[in-house]
Amino acid sequence: MNNDFSRDCIYHTINHQLDLDGKKYETRQLIEYCIRPSSKKEYEDVINGTIYSVLTFDQLKKKNITTESLVDWAIPMDLIERYQHFLDMNNSSSMELLYNCTIPWFGPFCQYRFALNQTFSSIVDITFESKQAQDSYANFTCYVHMKCDRGSSLLCLDWREICDGKIDCLDGGEDEKYCLELHMNQCAQDEYQCRNGMCINQVFLLEAGISYSQDYECLDQSDESSEAGTMKRCVKDPSFRCEDTVCRFPNTLTCGDGDCIPWSVPNEGHSCYNNRDQVFNYDFEWHNEQVTRFSRCFKLGICASNIFSENDFDYYCQKLCENVKICKMNLEYCPSYLFEPDFPVWDGHVRLGFFSNQTFMEKGYPLIPHFVCYDKYKCSFLSPTFELNNNYTCIHIHHLNLSYPLDYNKIFISCIQHYQNVDEMTCVSSSTLHCLGTNKCIPKRYVMDGIPDCYNGFDESIAANSCVLNDNYRFHCTSESKCLSPTMVRDGTSQCIGNEDETYSSEQVTHIQQLPFSALCDGRQELFSSTNESDETHCEQWPCTNQYTRCNGVWNCPKGIDEINCPSNFHCPQNHHPCLFPKTQIMGCLHLNQTEDGTMDCLGGTDERTFCHLSYPGDENRRYRCWNDTKCVDYSQRCTRCKSSEDVNEFCGKPTYSIFDISEYFQFMQDLYLVVKLPFSPQSSRPFPTRPTSPSINKPIQNQVFQAKQLKNIDRLNSKQTWFCHRGILIYYGKNESEKCLCPPSYYGSRCQYQNQRVSLTLRFRNENLNKLDIMGIIITLIDNAGVIQSHEQVTYIPIHDCNTKFNIYLLYRDRPKDTTKNYTIRIDAYDKINLLYLASWTLPVKFIFMPVNRVSAELVIPARYHCHRVCNLQHREQQKLVNTEFCRCESKNPQTTFLDREKCNCSSDSLCVGIVHNRSICLCPLTKMSPRCFIKSICHKNICMNGGLCVPHNDRISLTNFTCACQDGFSGKRCEYEDVKIDISFYDVS
């Protein structure tokens, strides 16, 4: 995928995987970290690091050095490929140089090294896990492809603020200029419309309830319940679900990394790890010499407030006046009122005002404005208290009834307007709703979605008639006339008076035949019928501890007797459960007799689990009980929603990998693990009864602080090393070890400080053919309307393994910034990876070209083959049409090319050239080859799978030795070495 703006790339893969009901759900993403300068001019001369040896290709050949040896030397892949091509030519000679680096140096000229002696994947993980809150500013990134004055010199535009509904660019509102097109967008019948107007395939709606992922196909996360987004910690997560989402709620502020916090001024909570929220504390920056948007009179007013000690006065005020008395005297020459700062602080029109004759600050109480001015046409529902002679409409601060910190959005969010209405009673579009008592109109999809857009919450009331919207995706309350946005169902808050929105299941069971055998008497009622019979009645006749419940990590039986004496990393004695003791913060064990006795002994209430089940029967996640409290929360939210110091302990800031065992133990308390019903199979079965535990498990336990000590043996990075490259990875360059950065596709610049324009694509495939040995190569290209390929990506799709896999893919533009006069299309071509035959194609439009990030998702069905009725010329043979458009494609008779001139391609002779990008060939390799031009043998050049299985190499950008075997029916295992259990029935002499 790299282009002319990137070089020296290393790859990191992110896989989010869950096995549920015998199915594997996976989200797969390959992140390309490269040197990505701001312009091509930034490339510089190479400065070598430490080199072990320098050899020409001729010398390597004379020494009988193979490409396999070069792989072991960690030589860059493109250089290995050129060497292999040199060997294949046989009679050629080459003086091209190969640099063999001394560990830990790497790169084509041994010019780089990492800060840690770890694998690259580990370095990425450690870098993000080590990020902690910063003490200074300037650690957030900027979007610079739009001219934008943010008012403060400390602040820049974030791409997520474009089309967020409020004006952020004070020099013309460029960030909201073209957004009406997005809000007025219309979706197809099989599509769900996101809150911001974008459309996604309906199959992606509310998938978090199926796969328990945090994946969002809507850019604004509005395809999943609001509860799903509360678990994000984006400062430590470089994946799509953080980098390629915007804030869901308009009353929140983006941290610039995917996290969002409540918007208030000032924000004293330091909620953003990178401190971006602190830059919005405008008036707190009055003394900052870098900030020039505060008048001298305002500074005099603060210094005249008599709140500073003598030393503080000298520090803040000495340059203005000698003492408080002189400050007050000078203040008399100032205007009667001041706007400070001198720019709007909200939506381009809300200004903070101060009267010169009133105290600016009081001891122990920070800066609070005396009045607020606003646009009276946008906020016609407000009753102003006075107007200023320069046409400002204003209201005294105490008339707004704001809490501190000042949540201006509580009032002024109702002033945001996407549509211009015809008059005060009529909206310009039938797809909009008129907010009563105002001149504001909102899209009807905003009605009853949990976000009050109209003043006094009219759109969230019964009066908004949410059930007449003709929206098939809405949830109809049976207890009242209310139809909810689907994202409000099972979000942790009851909206229907009968609570049916929290107890509803889209797969509610009404017949016993719908349940697997393992669901009977497992502690969770799933059968709801008109009779009193359910899957949990008469369970006293049923053995609770059985093959399905025994040692599955979940308490299915009273007092958790099904989890007693099971293999565990905590090594408890017999008849004991693991227990994190609150006072000592030590992981120990608690006897069975002390569980469910009404006394909470363990953090989270792991010994009293019935309490949260009874308190929150409809919320499967709220199973962690706060210490000395009746509140139950999601385990991942304990550090923010529990108040006790026992819950908010030192482990809240520990990296996830350092406390994995204890985290996993707590998470198994959630009812979502009760949903996992494995159908009977040899793979899902456990030995029952369980075998006796080893004697070592019965030894007396020694209490230990859980896993925390392991951190001392793990390489760590200091604060500068984790934040220097923002969301990128630090490397050292040359013998002087200067700092450089490897940036992911979403950022560029010397420190990855700039946000990149891109297409963020999610694909999931379905295959109509049921052949287990189908292997497909998928080529994805971003093409402009002139047919020029902007960038490309390639994935291997194995239907038998990847049926429920999402592929998250970045596509970058050829130019920076992108050419907005062009239209762009995503093209997906599918090939048979075994014989390289063409199978099918799709095109997906890239809409809303004014958006910095275009979020596109699709589920594509690879069809059984069908033909076009089009005659191609003599040089080409007829081929298939695009699946989703009426367009036939002609393919070259030359098996090594498609519609390209062979002279332009330099792929290996046994591969397929499918395109040209940046003067480089796009090559599709057979299973036996790998590398960009397919000259290097893959791990599968000798089929290492058994019993007729097919070897499929993994992505060579991540691993050169990993592979998957696609097995024939009747066989399984890593290499298809196991013959599945079967019953052979033979008939003889049947007459």
Image (cartoon, rainbow, N blue to C red):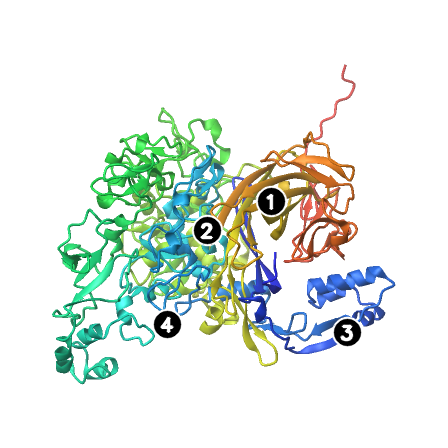
Q: Secondary structure at mark 2?
A: loop
Separation of marks 2 and 3 at Cα, in angstroms: 50 Å
Q: For the residue marked with disc 3, what is the amino acid?
A: Leu
Residue pointed to by mark 3: 55
Q: For the residue marked with disc 2, what is the amino acid?
A: Phe
Mark 4 closeness class: few <14, some 14–19, many ≥20 residues within 10 Å: few
Mark 1 closeness class: few <14, some 14–19, many ≥20 residues within 10 Å: some
Of the image marks 3 and 4, the number of the one nearer the N terminus: 3
Residue pointed to by mark 1: 827
- The C terminus appears in which quarter of the rendering? top right
Q: Secondary structure at mark 1?
A: strand
Q: Is residue 840 left or right of residue 579?
A: right
Residue pointed to by mark 4: 135
Q: For the residue marked with disc 4, what is the amino acid?
A: Asp
- The N terminus appears in which quarter of the rendering? bottom right
Mark 3 closeness class: few <14, some 14–19, many ≥20 residues within 10 Å: some
Residue pointed to by mark 2: 850
Of the image marks 2 and 3, the number of the one nearer the N terminus: 3
Residue 605 can be seen, yes or no: yes
Q: Residue at x 33, y 34 (%)?
A: 430
Seen as rendered, the residue at the extreme top is 991
Task: Name which quarter of the figure residue 930 lies in.
Answer: bottom right
Q: Is residue 720 left or right of residue 171?
A: right
Give whichever of 424, 740 is nearer the camera: 424
- Image position of 835 with respect to 286: above or below: above
Q: Is residue 47 left or right of residue 71?
A: left
